[in-house]
Image (tube, rainbow, N blue to C red):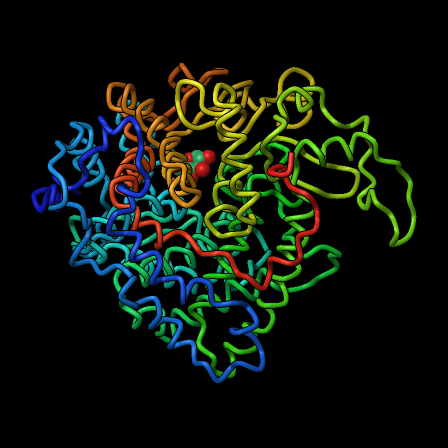
Amino acid sequence: MDGARDTGLKNVASTSSLAGMDDFDLSKLLDKPRLNIERQRSFDERSLSELSIGFAARASVENLEAMNSPGGRSYLDTPASSSRNSFDPHPMVAEAWDALRRSLVYFRGHPVGTVAALDHTEEALNYDQVFVRDFVPSAMAFLMNGEPEIVKNFLLKTLHLQGWEKRIDRFKLGEGAMPASFKVLHDPARKTDTLIADFGESAIGRVAPVDSGFWWIILLRAYTKSTGDLSLAETPECQKGMRLILALCLSEGFDTFPTLLCADGCSMIDRRMGVYGYPIEIQALFFMALRCSLMMLKHDAEGKEFIERIVKRLHALSFHMRNYFWLDFQQLNDIYRYKTEEYSHTAVNKFNVIPDSIPDWIFDFMPTRGGYFVGNVSPARMDFRWFALGNCVAILSSLATPEQSMAIMDLIESRWQELIGEMPLKISYPTLESHEWRIVTGCDPKNTRWSYHNGGSWPVLLWLLTAACIKTGRPQIARRAIDLAESRLLKDNWPEYYDGKQGRYIGKQARKFQTWSIAGYLVAKMMLEDPSHLGMISLEEDKQMKPLIKRSTSWTC
Ligand code: GLC
């Protein structure tokens, strides 16, 4: 399985840390990359109206070409800083590359992904499979290291799986569904490799992974941006794959909201945790996938129809999220004073949130400066919990306005003990306990208080935090978080998650050598060292969506 190990630590020397740079100088950090970021703007900031109906003459090929603009990265110079400085790489970096390469999965001799975990001390369950979401940080690491081939193979392999007929009992799943995970079965006698995939029909809880399709689109754009290879995204197969995913999530149904209605457990939090409804993780990924698709869809007859629907949805979605999911001190105070039972379109309390349902913890937790997107908003139900992934992706996709992005970073800084503690990063905050835990999780023994998805700390989230920090010009926050991870991750053999209020304990049932903990660390290191990598996973703000925000955000406090 580890045939690629000897190709080795290709660019490891370049992944040197910035240790010693206590007093972080962003301008120095952005040194060469700043130029890249500036030049990319013409593409990234292209407004929705420009891309929309009536401007269709601008072929999307051009959008893709813009990805390949001089500001776009080419694998030949990745990572750019290898010759730029002489820091010694942190010893963990070499160990991490070695572990990441050991996790490679091959199909007929070609690498197609990485297993979720290589822990031989625990029962494998499905951790020996390639999970779509888990592979994203691995893919980023390989792209940043100038090894795009595996990412391309993965994108094509999963695209192929999308075409399978998917059934659960007698029900046929939507055509566009992407699997949660797949496995390669090697038959040494016959010398054949075959694939099996799980679209939710074998997963615990039998939930279809809504996030897989979104991650696939986001990864396709990252690949295109990183390599400048437009040909993959332009193939009829990839165009169709995108359209199928979009067809599933753009259908209107009976919903009154532009957000996407989901079952519990349909994303990274893949067990019952009370995130059903309109979870922030899915809404942020949905928004990002829509924006990425807009950049990659061709303006042919089929593509155009989707482009028009995407543009409309993005306008509605950004308005809804920025207004109704956003919580800061001011907004909390407004909700606290809400009247209820208001009828008609003049209602201020549109979703009839009953102030008595506001949990006690939020009043102390909310800083005067700072804010975040809450976990969920639906009729008479506001889930005030903090979820890390959704908030980081909101920053990266520019679902959050620049002011909201700053406010999220302010919150992380002022609530460091709660959200980062001794191991970055809390997946959700706070925990559910006692009666609430029983009701909401269905007495889940894995999701006990401050464990796993229920307030556990997940090292994989470090890469998303780091990307968000760089985007908002706050790399010192990432530096601090990476230092914490470096003090334990390797020593503890790269656990899947940590438990406890401060994240001090290796998770009760955490796998060791969890691939995305390893890859997440590498990606965080590489991005901090060469911030131009950020372009792969970050989209600039769309000016057209800006005037929609009316409510004051925390920066005015
Ligand atoms: C767990 C996590 C899920 C992850 C999988 C493989 O089920 O909850 O997010 O994809 O493990 O690591």
Q: How many marks?
A: 0
Give the position of the N terminus as an image quadrant.
Answer: top left
Snapshot quadrant of residue 41: bottom left
Tell which of 158 and 473 is nearer to you.
Answer: 473
Tell which of 335 and 440 is nearer to you.
Answer: 335
Task: Report whether 343 appears left or right of 330.
Answer: right
Residue at 62%, 30% in the rendered image? 385
Residue at 80%, 44% in the rendered image? 351
Can I make out residue 415 in this image?
yes
**Residue 337: percent from left, percent from top:** 83, 31
Residue 481, above or below 237:
above
Can I make out residue 164 in this image?
no
Residue at 47%, 55% in the rendered image? 214
Task: Report whether 85 appears left or right of 502.
Answer: left
**Residue 43: percent from left, percent from top:** 40, 66
Task: Report whether 219 appears left or right of 448.
Answer: left
Snapshot quadrant of residue 170: bottom right
**Residue 418: percent from left, percent from top:** 52, 21
Give the position of the C terminus as an image quadrant.
Answer: top right
Residue 28, above or below 505:
below
**Residue 225: percent from left, percent from top:** 32, 61
Residue at the limit of the structure toward the left, as seen here: 6
Quadrant position of ligand 1:
top left
Residue 482, above or below 147:
above
Tell which of 71 and 283 is nearer to you.
Answer: 71
